[in-house]
Image (spheres, helix red, strand yellow):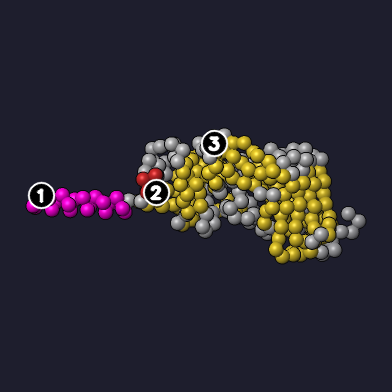
Amino acid sequence: MLSLCALVALAFTACKKNDTQKVSFTATMPQTVNDVRTHANDLGTALLWDEGNTITVVDAAGEDMDFTLVSFDGQVATFTAEGDAATFMKDIETADYTAFYPAVVDGEGVRMTIPAEQTYVPGMWFANDLYPMVAFNEGNNFVFQSNCGFLNVSFKDVLGRQADRVVLTANEDIAGDMVYAKDGLTYVFEGTSQSITITSTEKHQLYPELARDYTFVLPEGVLANGFTVEIFDGETLIGSKTTQGSFPIVAQEFTIMSVITLGGEE
């Protein structure tokens, strides 16, 4: 009877230990060249995590699970796996895992979208959950990188008008889906639109001396054959700029246009 009680106690202890198993891991943002939130800092030199950000992790067998950060400090986020999630992540120190952000698993691939409508955020910042990234684990840390870059456009207006949207148009698809293999090693870009609009729910002021920035998230390689940017106040076109030059978007880099001055003779 004493032996039986000891076995029952041991089994209870083992179950309790399994229930409280926990695996912690981190994820590190990439650097950009302008030295590149899920938002960028004020100078666009670093990507930073935001509260509530969720990554999708895929193991070597192709199984996937989502994790929401529990804490973050600038470029480094911490995640915790418990219960079934801990079992899923138990080999993080020794096996290969891949992580994606922000992502949807689609059959045998992982899909991340560059939308044709992007939300205005002041400066060299951009909306949360917008910039597609892929990461490979180095031990218990996922090191993120991206095949997308940025176009920064800025306007001054000598007439001091207001605006609520900026439209970028090219002669190729610039919005669509980045569809990755689950191991993260290859991807294809499935284009859906030759234009991207940055929209704002409120009109914002343009100034004669102080430029207002708009930052587009784009797939690498586009805009090599020129593009047009247009700025609107409602349905009224305030101004536009067309370039025929080759300014291809480079992954993890900001392509920054010279300030466009509107109004007067220009």
| Residue highlighted by disc 1 | 3
Q: Is residue 42 left or right of residue 202?
A: left
- Could you say which quadrant of the image residue 120 lies in? bottom right
Q: Residue furthest left?
A: 1
Q: Can the viewer see residue 188?
A: yes
| Residue highlighted by disc 3 | 181
Q: Tag 1: residue type?
A: Ser
Label 3 packing within 10 angstroms: few (<14), some (14-19), many (20+) = some
Q: CA distance from mark 3 to mark 2?
A: 22 Å
User: From what the image shows, is residue 148 above or below residue 164?
Assistant: above
Q: Quadrant of the C terminus?
A: bottom right
Q: Tag 3: residue type?
A: Ala
- The part of the chain drawn in magenta is 1-20
| Residue highlighted by disc 2 | 85
Q: Position of residue 126 (x, y in %)?
A: 64, 54
Residue under the image location 74 percent in, 64 percent down? 204
User: From what the image shows, is residue 182 above or below residue 7?
Assistant: above
Q: CA distance from mark 3 to mark 1?
A: 53 Å
